[in-house]
Amino acid sequence: MNMQSQLSFEEFRREVLNDYRLACISREVSLLGRREVLTGKAKFGIFGDGKEVAQIAMSKYFKPGDFRSGYYRDQTWAFATGVANVEQFFSQLYADPDLANDPFSAGRQMNSHFATPNIDMDGNWLPLTAQKNTAADMAPTAAQMPRALGLAYASKLFREVPELEGMTHLSHQGNEVCFATIGDASTSEGHFWETVNAAGVLQVPLCIFVWDDGYGISVPRKYQTTKGSISAALEGFRKGEQTNGLEIYNVKGWDYAGLCEVFEEGIRKARETHVPVLFHVEEITQPQGHSTSGSHERYKSKERLAWEKEFDCNSKMRQWILVNALADEGALQEVEAEAKVLAHEGRKRAWEKYIAPIRGQVQGLTAILKNLVEEGRVETELVQHTIQELAANREPLRRDILKSAAHILFRYPRDFSPVLNDLQLFYDNQLVTEKENYNSLLYATGANSALNVPEVPAEYAADAPVLNGYEVLNKYFDQLFTDNPLVFAFGEDVGKIGDVNQGFAGLQAKHGKVRISDTGIRELTIMGQGIGMALRGLRPIAEIQYLDYLLYGLQPLSDDVASLQYRTRGTQFCPIIVRTRGHRLEGIWHSGSPMGMIINSLRGFYVCVPRNMVQAAGMYNTLLRAHEPGIVIESLNGYRLKERMPENLNEFTVPMGVPEILHEGTDITIVSYGSTLRIIEEAIQTLSGLGVSCELIDVQTLLPFDTSHSILDSLKKTNRILFVDEDVPGGGTAYMFQQVMELQGGYRWLDVAPRTLSAQAHRPAYGSDGDYFSKPNVEDVVKVVMEMIRE
């Protein structure tokens, strides 16, 4: 060999051995992790053993700026890209609540759920193109797929929209690829199929890696997939010369050289041409079975287990290295021994970091308990027993400490003794600490929080024009898209016809087919499209045409977006805005008001329920000035109501969680929102004629709800309260009832029993009579109020 060839070969050899070392480290981590669970140090474990070589090959082509949307078996990829290290992996396995130790979730997610920050605490986007990025992982099968579409679609927008060219901290001209990983069995989920179809239509740089180990837990592939092969089943999706679609590659999960070659070609094609690619990675093994909750020997034959041992990817790579004379047996044994040491050392450091503060808490509590014994005022035997239990617990949990303290405190009155007061203070301080560890950051704080957006009142000229509600929104969106290049709107019928209620009428022609675009009938991936875009610095307005169809897209909004800030402890944000419309219309599936479902499944969202379109515009303004997710539910029967146009339509804001008094009164407080307010306003006119003075309050947002307790102030004045909405009994009304009666302590100010007035338990019947008898009407409101007045 000449000198250049020798250097090139040596470099190649060194890279291969480094890859093998990493594969061995990751395998040892899996083995150690299972042991930690089975010995009780960790609660549950699920690992990536059997996928090491394929993920190392994949990581070679993952560049800064790229995004991953994966699942819980990608630990080797995380190690190979530098997104995670061994110590951090074990910190997450132990559920360490210190973000410095588990930077992905601070112990709030189980192992191998990775995440990278995207926005800083000052509300600035981080330089995403300078870092390797991953969306925060989830456990629900195939839930990573819808957002993967959006992460890839953002690259298309960055490449095609001229206004985005200068935003180099977010994209390098759309050259970023989204890497989506999924287990073969999970491709049976509708999430997968809808994503693949949408990616084929949109032509976006999405690379899907299907890890095929032949099973879905215990269910063989033949019961999962048509033709027993996801690549065969997808053959009709393959891109032709004159068609859209995706490229499909088949490769063996143990073939190191083949994996590197095929991944390089496919990923390069996706990056350059934005054609989506699917890699069907076959003959993957799972040496330890599905998870620590069971054994795969229960459902795999001896022949299958023998095959898995023979085709283990690490063993195959080892053979390949020896056959190609890249290293001898002795060198490989050194690599393997070093890998074990590195894995064990990482585990040990993680455990010490996790257990040290807990032991410190035990020492602090024990010292107080010993002082209690010396003081002699409490039951000495009880305290001594507690001290002994704490000392005997080799692996204490934080809860053990609090339970031990509470066990004593509950037996004695406050201020029983000076030392007991010290114990109470210890207990209270510890509760505050653990609340921060485990119950914080469901919503953002600081500059990222919608609650911190300054209120800007709407301003009206003396001769302010009066327009239909949809015309107000149309003018609002027109100016918004002119001023803010990061905003995009999309959904069914949003583009060409300007949405079914004309809020975007004529705006696609003005602002372009990419800024305001039509989609297929695919609510799930419309939400995923918005999620991925929002993670990459864009401000999507993703539309669900009717509120009734939110159910199709609810899963990623609930499992992913709503919990995102919480489960990453405030390091990753997804400021998607979901636009939809609902409440009163006519028909079972076009008049929905499932507010209880939304409130309870979307904690972490802002749920805005504007009564008119001016108010809706102010809510959009507020959300766009923060970095939190929100859903705006416009009133279906409000688009043709007349409204005055503010002069500062694109500047004024509606504060979140601040109710508005629409009608002042002294006899009864009526609380509602949205379209129902107009029913109540008509009822108030009748009630006024009957001598009843009603105070009507529009809550404006259900999440958050009345942060200043202004409803309580009204109740103190009227001493009667009625909650009204169009949800089923026990839905939105029960939520408002609980907020005011329990959290605000409203029960103290009641002269009569509080009431709720909701729709019927069934879906609304069709037609005007169906609406009247299915949902609260004017006469219902008058009747209930009069009953309360006479009580």
Image (spheres, rainbow, N blue to C red):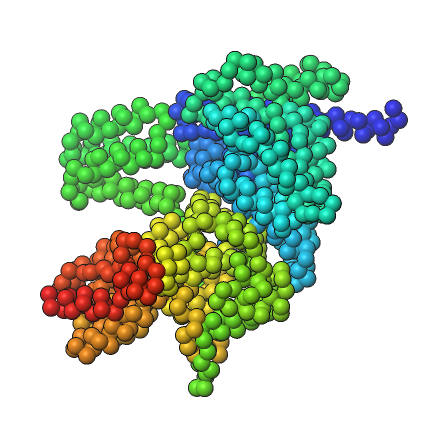
Residue sitting at 49 percent across and 76 percent down? 648
Say if 318 sits above or below 101 in the image: above
Residue 336 percent across, percent down from the top left? 62, 19
Residue 487 percent across, percent down from the top left? 56, 62
Quarter of the rendering containing residue 670: bottom left
348 or 738: nearer the viewer = 738
Residue 691 percent across, percent down from the top left? 16, 77
Number of numbered labels in the structure image: 0
Q: Quadrant of the N terminus?
A: top right
Residue 6 percent across, percent down from the top left? 83, 26
Residue sitting at 20 percent across and 77 percent down? 688
Relative placement, left or right, of 277 versus 681 is right
Say if 311 sits above or below 403 in the image: above
Residue sitting at 74 percent across and 25 percent down? 13
Relative placement, left or right, of 357 versus 264 is left
Can residue 165 be seen by looking at this rendering?
yes
Q: Quadrant of the C terminus?
A: bottom left
